[in-house]
Amino acid sequence: MSIRAVAGIIGPVDGPFGQRAPRCATAIQPDRLAIALVFVVQLFVFPHFPGMHSANEWSRLFLVEALVDRHEVEITPSIRTHGDINDKSRRDGRFYSDKPPGTAFLAAPGIALRRALGGGPDLAADTRLARILAGVLPTLLLLLMLRREMTDLGVSPASRSLVLATYGLGSPGFTYALLFYGHQLTAVLLYATWFTLRRPAIGPGRAALAGFLGASCLVTEYQSAVYLVPLVVVALARVRPRLASIAAALAGAALPLAALGFYHQAAFGNPLKTGYNFIANPYFAKV
């Protein structure tokens, strides 16, 4: 079911398909207020329970600490400092994150800036900043893209507001935006890839951006390859000129994939091996 169809159920749609909905007479449209509300709530809600040793988050956060504070990928020192976690890989007696590194790559520059401004290692502060960088801000970008697409489809401001607020505050997207997982960032990257490809004709510039975004999905969650397959089909059908655009898409994908390969080599001794090849927990390794 399309965005237009969903929004049409819950409210009126202005104008025929493909035409922009008329602007509201008010200076601030309700859909913009909905986005602002979602952003403020997500920005200030901070569920933090360090006693749980949140394995999914800490595995990624320990990699951020390793990259920023020690300029390495081994997380053994962080485990000794903060406590053990289940989500880790073991190779040659050393521990590494078993997660794809995309979220850590995104959060690391912000954590490094915090260090440069005098903020020492602090698990709570680093967690909060990492969540904002890899969850809250990408979700804001997603909402803006959704608003733009619904506007282009002629969905009314009232319906857009309801869709945006419901997604941002009443769906799993709200939960995952508040956690330093890969789920929400992957969703944003997948939608951004589609958003880049949604025009009938895609030139080399957009193809390069789509390649970069699509490859970034893989760097964040390996399983996103399943969802990238139909997007690749869309891209092949829409790129013009075909050979130049395909080359541009491959060039755009090269940087994220190279970073992923270098990380795998540093952590697991082979650019094609992942943390899942070295799972430390025997039970998880059997699954």
Image: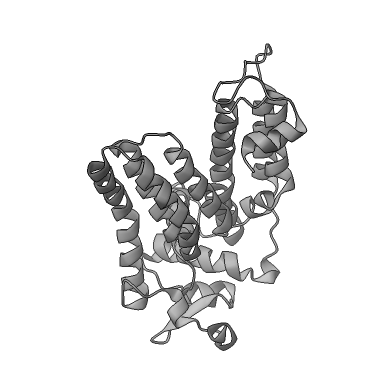
Residue at x-position 52% and y-position 45%: 191
Q: Nearer the viewer, residue 252 or 199?
A: 199
In screen coordinates, is 80 left or right of 247?
right
Q: Looking at the image, can residue 115 be seen?
A: no
> Is 141 left, or right, of 90 in this rendering?
right
Q: Nearer the viewer, residue 83 or 151?
A: 151
Image height of 255 relative to 153, above or below: below
The picture places residue 47, in percent across and down from the top left corner, at 70, 56
How many numbered circles does the render carry? Answer: 0
Residue located at (59% from left, 78% from top): 86
Quick one: quadrant of the N terminus?
Answer: top right
Q: Is residue 157 above or below residue 262?
A: above
In front of the other: 117 or 79:
79
**Which quadrant would the C terminus be assigned to in this image?**
bottom right
Viewer-side residue, 81 vs 31: 31
Q: Residue 148 sits in which quadrant?
A: top right
Which residue is depicted at the point 41% across and 73% down? 274
Q: Residue furthest right?
A: 10
Q: Residue furthest top?
A: 25
**Left or right placement of residue 43 versus residue 207 in this view:** right
Residue 139 placement (x, y as % from top left): 58, 44
- Where does residue 154 sit, x and y in percent of width and height? 61, 25
In the depicted structure, whether residue 95 falls above or below residue 225: below
> Hey, which quadrant is residue 269 in on the image?
bottom left
What residue is shown at x 49% (from left), y 49% (from top)?
190
Instruction: Report if residue 140 is visible in the image.
Output: yes
Q: Residue 125: x, y in percent?
A: 58, 54
| Colour basis | one colour
